[in-house]
Image (cartoon, rainbow, N blue to C red):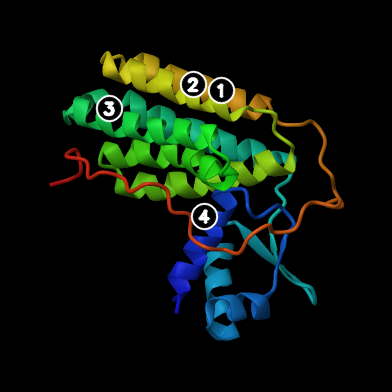
Amino acid sequence: MANQSEIAERIVEAVLAQKLAPGERLGEQELADLYGVSRTLVREALMQVQARGFVEVRARKGWYVVEPSLDEARDAFAARRAVEYGLLAGAAEQGRPLQAAVRMLRRHIAEEKSAIDGADAATRAFLLADFHVCLAECFGHRVLAGVLRDLTARTTIVATLYQSTHDARQSCAEHEQIVDALDGGRFDLAAQRMLDHIGSVESALGKSLDAEGGSRERLRATLAPIAPPPRAESDTSPR
């Protein structure tokens, strides 16, 4: 039986995996039946996710995945640029073993490539988004990892809503270029490539918003947790 935090995290995972679309309705009773818990527990989990900016409650209608405005979309990408550029630009001053971080990131990219070659679209989407969380984790930034998980989930909603044309293989290649720069000790280049990457994702967004939500595909699968291959322990984590 799932607890409140587990239900909340599965909803966020489903957003990262693009299994939940903007405007998707989340019925309290359906979720309660799915997880074998009370509607009260589900409501508390949804309130937790609401505080993180992913769902909203509409009067007399229920809970829905948010549909960010253009201004909110720009804010989300601007926040990611500030956080991720700062993370990489400041990494040179931390004195942490770089090669351990590079190994961890290359393993993650290998998982991305395997998912891209396979047929599991949900795992592919999750791993491409999770690269940015992995980047923070491998440099020991646990708080920033949580921040980036939420920011990346927000931009995933934006990409779905605005019909992004950014290709998965392109994202993976850009991730690899960032890691190549880190491998060469070029933190400044890695930071610039991160800015370029986030910019290319943002520029691939469609120009118009379907204000009515259209006939978007309903949730294709239950909110089961995404289970990519286990991430190896990094020796760059805080001691």
Q: Earlier in the sequence, mark 4 or mark 2?
A: 4
| Image disc number at residue 13 | 4
Which corner quadrant of the image does residue 104 belong to? top left
Label 4 or label 3, whichever comes before in sequence order: 4
Badge 1 is on which residue? Answer: 170
Neighbour tally class for label 3: few under 14, some 14-19, many 20 plus, Cα within 10 Å: many
Q: Secondary structure at mark 3?
A: helix
Alpha-carbon span between mark 4 and mark 2: 23 Å
Asked if the residue at tag 3 contacts the one at tag 1, i.e. Cβ–Cβ closer than 8 Å, the answer is: no
Q: Earlier in the sequence, mark 1 or mark 3?
A: 3
**Where's residue 188, x and y in %?**
35, 16
Task: Estimate the x, y position of residue 65 in percent, counting from the top left.
Answer: 68, 59
Q: Amino acid at mark 2?
A: Ala
Crowdedness of circle 4 by 10 Å Cα count: few (<14), some, many (20+)? many
What's under tag 4, amino acid-wise? Answer: Glu
Mark 2, residue position: 173
Q: Are marks 4 and 1 in contact (CB under 8 Å)?
A: no
User: Are circles 4 and 3 on residues that touch, CB within 8 Å?
Assistant: no
Relative side of 94 to 23, left or right: left
Please state the horizontal and vertical placement of residue 111, each as a whole percent of the image: 41, 36
Residue at label 3? 102
Label 2 packing within 10 angstroms: few (<14), some (14-19), many (20+): some
72 vs 181, nearest the viewer: 181
Point out the tag, 2 or 3, that comes first from the N-terminus: 3
